[in-house]
Image: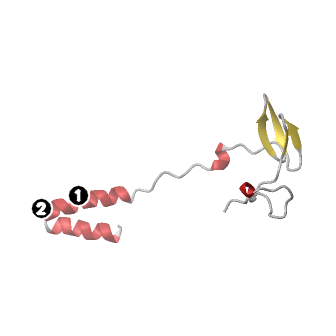
Amino acid sequence: MNPSLAVVQTLADTYKGTLMAACAEARLKELKLATVAPPPMQSTAAIVPAPTCGGVEAKVGSERRCLNPGGSFKDCPEMVVVPAGSFMMGSSESEEGRVYLEDPAA
């Protein structure tokens, strides 16, 4: 038995029939409910099927396609598939024709 549960149970037994025992029994119920383990989580591997292609499977228009980094597809305009990652949007100060609105996000 959990040490906290044992202490509260001792209080309930010691002061049986009193307000203290009633409070201890109520707390004992709360502690027992809190110590019940939640059901095990289902593995996402069982939910999400493994891709059938080497890249990312996606719906383009009305058909499903396998999109690989470096490849492209035409969906007006032509789209290029890039590898996952991050980048800072904007342009460098040395770019010709640049305006202040093209500063990278802070």
* Quadrant hosting residue 13: bottom left
Q: Which residue is mark 1?
A: 26
- Neighbours of disc 2 within 10 Å: few (<14), some (14-19), many (20+): few
Specify whether 80 is left or right of 58: right
Q: Nearer the viewer, residue 84 or 17?
A: 84
Q: Secondary structure at mark 1?
A: helix
The percent position of residue 85, horizontal first and vertical second, equals 76, 57
In the rendered view, tell whether residue 96 sits above or below residue 44. below
The percent position of residue 66, horizontal first and vertical second, equals 83, 40
Q: Residue furthest top?
A: 62
* Residue type at numbered disc 1: Ala
Q: Is residue 16 visible?
A: no
Mark toward the start of the polypeptide (2 vs 1): 2
Specify whether 78 is left or right of 86: right
What residue sits 66% from the left and 63% below the top? 106
Question: How far is disc 2 from disc 1 in space, using C-alphas?
Answer: 11 Å
What residue sits 33% from the left and 58% below the top? 32
Numbered mark located on residue 96 in the image: none
In the rendered view, tell whether residue 34 sits above or below residue 77. below
Pointers 2 and 1 in contact (C-beta within 8 Å): no
Q: How is the image coloured?
A: secondary structure
The percent position of residue 17, horizontal first and vertical second, equals 10, 60
In the rendered view, tell whether residue 63 sits above or below residue 29. above
- Neighbours of disc 1 within 10 Å: few (<14), some (14-19), many (20+): few
Q: Which residue is mark 2?
A: 19
The percent position of residue 4, horizontal first and vertical second, equals 31, 69
